[in-house]
Image: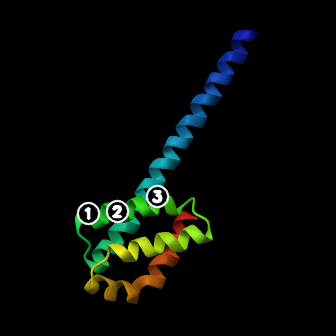
Amino acid sequence: MYSRIVKLILLMFFLAVTVNIAQEKAMSETIDKLADKLKQKILLNDNQLKEISLILADYKTADETQVKSLQKKIEGLLEPRQKAKYQIIKNDWWKEVNELLK
């Protein structure tokens, strides 16, 4: 009886860990997709892409004040030409970010 309970607990733990890993992988892929989409639209370099991916990883757990700060961080990474392009697509891109990460 005791060994069945232990086996059941271990199985539940294993399943929980597996589901968590799968969710994190899916979230990482979503973040990469969003960052890559921005890269294609405004021609980010590799360093900017990496930084934006890190910012988006923080975005999923951010509250409203932190969201504004993260948006400003992204804008701060951009060069003047990129900022001009970003202003054109900003609302649509952030709408997609909200739909996929929140």
| Residue type, mark 2 in image | Glu
Q: Secondary structure at mark 1?
A: helix
- Return the residue nearer the eye: 76 or 86: 76
Please indicate whether residue 84 sits to the left or right of residue 63 in the image. Answer: left
Residue 32 visible, this angle:
no
Q: Quadrant of residue 31?
A: bottom left
With respect to residue 58, does 3 lie above or below? above
Please indicate whether residue 80 sits to the left or right of residue 75 in the image. Answer: left
- Marks 1 and 2 sit apart, C-alpha to C-alpha, by 6 Å
Name the residue beneath numbered marker 1. Answer: 47
Q: Quadrant of residue 41?
A: bottom left
In what quadrant of the picture does the C terminus appear?
A: bottom right
With respect to residue 64, does 16 lie above or below? above
Mark 1: give few (<14), some (14-19) or many (20+) Cα within 10 Å. few
Mark 2: give few (<14), some (14-19) or many (20+) Cα within 10 Å. some
Q: Residue at x 56, y 41 (%)?
A: 19
Name the residue beneath numbered marker 3. Answer: 57
Q: Residue at x 72, y 17 (%)?
A: 5
- Return the residue nearer the eye: 90 or 100: 90
* Sequence order check, earlier mark of 3 and 2: 2
Q: Which mark is residue 51?
A: 2
Rendering coords of residue 7 (x, y %): 65, 18
Rendering coords of residue 26 (x, y %): 47, 53
- Marks 3 and 2 sit apart, C-alpha to C-alpha, by 10 Å
Residue lying furthest right: 1
- Return the residue nearer the eye: 75 or 50: 75
Assess whether mark 2 and mark 1 are in contact (beta carbons under 8 angstroms): yes
Rendering coords of residue 55 (x, y %): 43, 63
| Residue type, mark 1 in image | Asn
Q: Residue at x 57, y 29 (%)?
A: 14
| Residue type, mark 3 in image | Ala
